[in-house]
Image: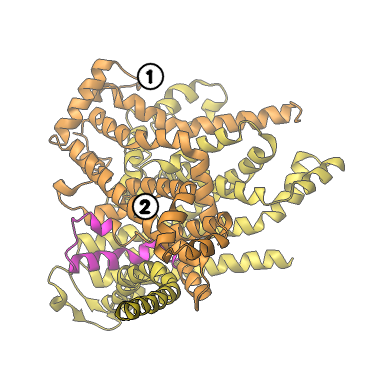
Amino acid sequence: MNSQTTIKQEFHFGRFYTRWQRILAPYVFISPFFILFLVFGLFPMLFSIYVSMTSWDAISGLGGMKFVGLDNYRFLFLEDTAFWNSVKQTAYIALISGLPQHLIAIPLAFIIHTGMKKMQAFVTAIYFAPFVTSVAAIAAVFGTLYSERSGVLNWLVLEVFNKIPLLNSIIPDDPIRWLGDRHLVPISISILVIWRYTGWNTVLYLAGLQAISQDLYEAAEVDGASRFERFRYITLPLLRPTMFTAFTFTIIGNMQLFAEPFLLVNTSGGVANSGRTSVMYLWDNAFNNLLFGDAATQTWVLFAIIITLTIINNQIFARLRND
Amino acid sequence: MQKLTLGNALIYGLILFGGLLMAFPLYFMLVFATQSRETIFSFPPPLVPGSIDQIVSNYNALMKMTDNTFWRVFYNSFYLASMATITTLFFCSLAGFGFAMYDFKGKNALFAVVVATQAIPAALNLIPFYLVMNLIGWINQPRALWFPGMASAFGIFLTRQYIQSAIPRELMDAARVDGSTEFGMFWRIILPLIRPALGTLGLITFIGVWNEFVLQSLIFRSPETRTLQTLIRAISGGTTATNVDYGGLMMGTAITVLPLLIIFIFTSRQLITGLTAGSVKN
């Protein structure tokens, strides 16, 4: 009798447990993400909205915060020309490092996809390899290649290209100041950015191309369409959704460009701040000048700029779709 | 079959040339790592790798530049990337399993939140992240960099996709009849079945954390806690420094880059497929 009730109770408990753990299980399984996001993502960001309305050096602890209202924003919009200069340089570098990536990646992906069967994986891997290199290490290598007096690039320019007839008329006779001229610094940074990310974009476009039905190409080939015609009239229109995704990635990523310029031209920002991006500027404000209130303000304004640019991109693609 | 026309030859020539440009900096990294500082900056610069003696001498220079902490720093990077990888594999596949194999209230909305967090620009979190780590005293602690990211949206998305496509739900019912708990199913049935996805996610996580520079330079501010990324930054002293032993420095960059490049050579297809699957679909 006694033992029977125990069994019965255990059985009931067992069923209860089975039922509830089954209902709660998925919530428990997905909870780490939400807890971590709240603690290390959402809360810090909301906190930084408050920080943007304070004057704070962060080392004096929470007690050292001084509420200043919208003063930081007023200063940013009315007086902080250095910030707006950094936005201008960021947008410029974003454009000259972003556009070539896509102009190379789209035809490259098309050729890899349509014209290479056995070599496909190998060629993709070569172009993608820079993406798995460490930016700190590779920036040190680029810095050496860019060396003005004795770098490999200037050796190529002065001793090789300059010895080639015809070419030598457009090649300068003096060493190129890759990291020492304010017009060249954005270009030198962009070369590194293009080198690192063109493969990534190629791979994005390859994935987009694989989604396009092979029948379309075959039908076009039967109709006698050349490779260029197939690219122009089949690939480009059908690749538009992928282009939208890839453009969005590039805009968001490039407007936050930091590591490449930071490592190449140092915290100083290069000659005449020509290589100082907005994130470099706010980094400098926070960690060197201990102006965390201003840095938080700059972060949020930069965020608004990025959002605006992605909306514009969105509108352009929406219009293309309608045409 | 493509015919070999002049146009095609030109196109493939261009692709070959582009591939050489991609390999160019990596090749010179190896050349510089095996040449002395004087040779690197002589004119014309060295175009081929140097001798074994010079490799040894550069290695010694690297040890001297880093006060013999180089391998300690290498271990720090390895430890950080390993912790991140192990925890990411566990928590992402657990959440991916939750999203893929259960129907529950709010599932679609919650998954939309997971996907949406990926669109938040990383720079937005830079200052807040540092402030929070400063407040809770995690500056110079490796956990500051693996703990917050261990249930990454990208990893959840990737494992969910894989579980959804590879594992039938009937398997779960069968396991339940056999008396398995929900977590027991994940641990004993799902994890072994999703090994390919775990391999891809593990690879992506390890490479990403190993190479990550910005947050590491925020958190690791003392020489003892340095990782390879922050060490290279510290010993190169920017590109304007003139008194740096570039042979030793380039040896350091080669040791940082080569292990991952070798892993990449053998896993490129898996890695690339995983990266695009996790990024394009949303």
Q: Which chain is orange?
A: B
Location of residue A191 in the rendering, given as x and y in whole percent from the top left corner: 45, 42
Q: Nearer the viewer, residue A14 or B133?
A: A14
**Residue shown at 57% from the left, 64% from the top:** A313
A196 relative to A14, above or below? above
Is the magenta region chiefly helix, strand or loop?
helix
Is residue A88 in view from this perspective? no
User: Residue at the right extreme?
Assistant: A223
Chain A shade: yellow
Q: Quadrant of the C terminus of chain B?
A: bottom right
Amino acid type assigned to the residue bearing label 1 in the image: Val
Location of residue B119 in the rendering, given as x and y in whole percent from the top left corner: 46, 65
Region of the chain picked out in magenta, as a range = B117-145
Amino acid type assigned to the residue bearing label 2 in the image: Ser
B224 relative to B183, above or below? above
Location of residue A1 in the rendering, given as x and y in whole percent from the top left corner: 33, 81
Q: Are marks 2 and 1 in contact (CB under 8 Å)?
A: no
**Residue shown at 21% from the left, 35% from the top:** B242
User: Residue at the front extreme?
Assistant: A1
**Residue shown at 63% from the left, 51% from the top:** A208
Residue picked out by circle 1: B48
Is residue A46 in view from this perspective? yes
Location of residue B79 in the rendering, given as x and y in whole percent from the top left corner: 25, 46
Whether marks 2 and 1 lie on the same chain? no
